[in-house]
Image (cartoon, grey):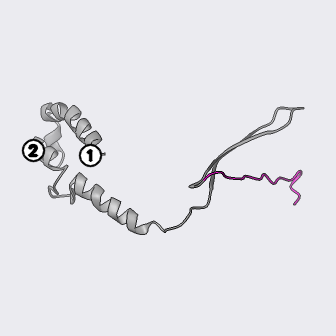
Amino acid sequence: MIQAIEERKNMISPYVAMDPYYPLDYGYDFDDFLNSYSSAIGAHVKWGLYPYLETRKSSMSAQIEPGTMAPVIKYVGHNRQVGQPITLSTTVEASSLPVSVTLLYSVGGGC
């Protein structure tokens, strides 16, 4: 991830350096832009980007509960053309395979 961020930083750096409006935001200059990736630079920038990401990564790792996650059902969709069978589609994600999926349905709102 650091490499991808560095590539983007290098890609936009020349434009930030030449942008006459950049220093008008909070008085930051090009050196502040470069330093913001590794250090807090004051005002509303209380963390450097890399230290922030590392802290978030550690925090997320501490919050993950051990064990197998229950399957997640998402992107449920349906399509019905008059006089045709209804088509249902969904995505099921699971941490271990295979996954068995059962569709339960009712007609007319009954149980």
Mark 1 and mark 2: Cα distance apart in space? 19 Å
Task: Tell me if mark 2 has few (under 14), some (14-19) or many (20+) residues whose alpha carbon lies within 10 angstroms of its own.
Answer: few
Q: Which residues are magenta?
A: 97-111
Residue at image location 73% in from the left, 52% down from the top: 101
| Residue 89 x/y as whole percent | 71, 41
Q: Is residue 42 magenta?
A: no
Amino acid found under the numbered disc labelled 1: Ile
Q: Secondary structure at mark 2?
A: helix
For mark 2, what is the residue? 31
User: Where does the C terminus fall, quadrant-wise?
Assistant: bottom right
Q: Is residue 47 above or below residue 66?
A: above
Residue at image location 26% in from the left, 46% down from the top: 2
Residue at image location 67% in from the left, 52% down from the top: 99
Residue 5 relative to residue 104: left or right: left
| Residue 29 x/y as whole percent | 11, 43
Q: Is residue 98 magenta?
A: yes
Q: Which mark is residue 18?
A: none
Q: Nearer the viewer, mark 1 or mark 2?
A: 1
| Closer to the camera in the image, 33 or 1 | 1
Residue 44 relative to residue 69: left or right: left
| Closer to the camera in the image, 56 or 29 | 56
Q: Which mark is residue 2?
A: 1
User: Where does the N terminus fall, quadrant-wise?
Assistant: top left
Q: Secondary structure at mark 1?
A: helix
Helix, strand or loop for the magenta stretch, by majority: loop
Amino acid found under the numbered disc labelled 2: Asp
| Closer to the camera in the image, 88 or 92 | 92
